[in-house]
Amino acid sequence: MKITRTHVSLFMAASLFSSYTHAVDINTGDYDALPAGTNLAMVYLQYSEANDFYQQGKRQDGYLRTEMSITRLIHYTEIGGMLVDPQILIPYGSVRGASVNGQSLGNATGFGDPIVGATFWVVNQPQAGYVGRYVGITPLLTLPLGNYDRHKAMNIGENRYKLDLQLGWVEPLYKQFSLELLQDSVFYGHNTDAGAGNQTLKQHPTYEVQTNLRYDFNRTQKMALGYAIYTGGRQHLDGDYNQTKTASQQARLEYQQLFAGHFQVSTQLIHDFDVKSGYKKDTGLNLRLLYLF
């Protein structure tokens, strides 16, 4: 079946929200290993607004506002002498006012696809430098259980499995400075109920490389200046390339404050630049509330 230009535009926009959140973003300090027996309960509150839409590097008029919350529960334990942290993430949120070239794509509200996984620390040296030296591997499996309706242009759920393989490395530099190198590889299952006629969406893997220059003022306060680049992710609908792929760069500034040894607030500002495909986030604010027990 040949896809018309209208179908391409509609489906491309329908898939963009999912593509834009293709990886589980990493906050500074996420790969600092905590003692076995520790538990974390976190709530992420994410807001972003985009006023530009790009297709193959060409700017078009567009708008997208997203408001998401993610509940994340983590437990640290040891398995065979290795530190491991089984975890689950449950997203919920809304997409509002989505449009491309004046064409409304509607709204979406509901639960996203839950994610389960764990980090396995292959290097755990808390005495190295000020914060320690750590290397962790994190497989995360996304389950297609979120709200999805193929008749809608925008969806919170994706109706497909995803495997996100993360690698995190924390390396002490000088005194309270450290470098965080983080990499994501996301592999996608097929969405067999996509488009307007039970079509099949296939997507190539997407990749993210993120780096943070981190400074710990003390044991309760830290700041990080980060940069991330996203690439890959060509999408095909029933074998036809739908002009959608992942290609963008992002700058991040994050500050974290720990209160009373148990409650942490993390604030992160983000800005997209050099977007080749998809919505460009002019303004993004990520707030994370963490309770350690």
Image: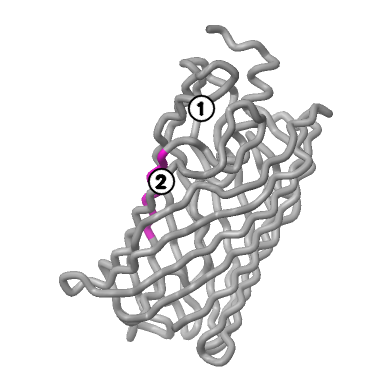
Question: In the rendered view, would you say 78 is above or below 106?
Answer: below
Disc 2 is placed on an element classified as strand
Disc 1 is placed on an element classified as strand
Q: Amino acid at mark 1?
A: Gln
Foreground of the two, 221 or 264: 264
> In the image, what residue occupies the spot 74% across and 35% down?
106
> In the image, what residue occupies the spot 59% across and 73% down?
289
Query: Of callouts 1 and 2, which one flags the residue occurring earlier in the amino acid sequence?
Result: 2
Which residue is label 2 attached to? 185
Foreground of the two, 197 or 275: 197
Give coordinates of residue 222: x percent, y percent. 57, 80
Mark 1 to mark 2: distance in Å? 16 Å
Q: Is residue 212 magenta?
A: no
Give coordinates of residue 193: x percent, y percent. 50, 25
Which labelled disc corresponds to residue 235? 1
For the stretch drawn in magenta, what is the main secondary structure?
strand
Residue range of the region highlighted in magenta in the rendering: 161-167
> In the image, what residue occupies the spot 59% across and 18% down?
196
Circle 1 packing at 10 Å, graded few (<14), some (14-19), many (20+), is: many
